[in-house]
Amino acid sequence: MAFKTQFPFRLPRGYVDEHGNVHRDGVMRLATARDEILPLQDYRVQSNRAYLVIVLLSRVITKIGDDEHISVDMIENLFSTDLAYLQEFYRKINEEGGAPKHHVTCPKCQHAMDVDMVTGALITEGGSGQSGPG
């Protein structure tokens, strides 16, 4: 099995480009030590620590829609829902390792399960995935 370093994602709302087109699909790579250290030298981060996540995401996101040049400006212009999603996605792929997943509970039957954030598959206790609701 190959070591996976790139993870596709789908933004909840989507990035709106300068032409008004909405882009929801993208790719994030695993962060390196350099990705986490260099933003600390950025003057924007030094004057406002909350800006760290903006600079960091602009380094590790390799694609949004067809655009493969991700700028700080693009990340600044994401909807807050999408920024929160990407922060959680970053945390899951870099800190937890493996495929990012969320633990959820069915509102109808109260069955608890994990959902693979990349494929949307449901992950059952045995580790196998399903493609739809259980």
Image (tube, rainbow, N blue to C red):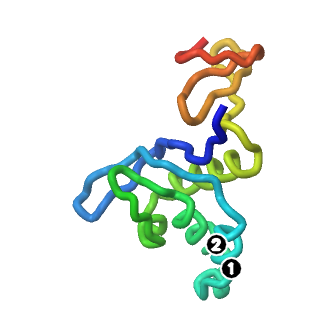
Q: Is residue 48 above or below residue 113?
A: below
Q: Amino acid at mark 1?
A: Leu
Mark 2: secondary structure: helix
- Which residue occupies the extreme front position in the image? 2
Badge 1 density bin: few <14, some 14–19, many ≥20, Cα 10 Å? some
Question: From the viewer's perspective, is residue 90 above or below residue 45?
Answer: above
Front label number (1 vs 2)? 1
Seen from the viewer's position, the closer of residues 96 and 15 is 96
Residue depicted at 62% across the width and 21% down the height: 122
Q: Earlier in the sequence, mark 1 or mark 2?
A: 1
Residue depicted at x 56% and y 60%: 60
Asked if the residues shown at circle 1 and circle 2 are in contact, with their CB atoms under 8 angstroms apart, the answer is yes
The mark found on residue 5 in the picture is none
- The residue nearer to you, when weighing 59 against 89, is 59
x and y percent of residue 95 in the render? Answer: 76, 50
The image quadrant that residue 48 belongs to is: bottom right
Which sits in the foreground, 4 or 55?
A: 4
What is the secondary structure assignment of the residue under circle 1?
Answer: helix
> Are there few (<14), some (14-19), or many (20+) residues within 10 Å of tag 2?
some
**Residue position marked by numbered label 1 in the rendering:** 40
Name, please, the residue furthest toward the left. 19
On the image, the x and y values in percent for residue 77 come to 43, 65
* Residue 68 position in % (x across, y down): 39, 58
Q: Amino acid at mark 2?
A: Leu
Label disc, if present, on residue 52 of the rendered structure = 2
Image mark count: 2
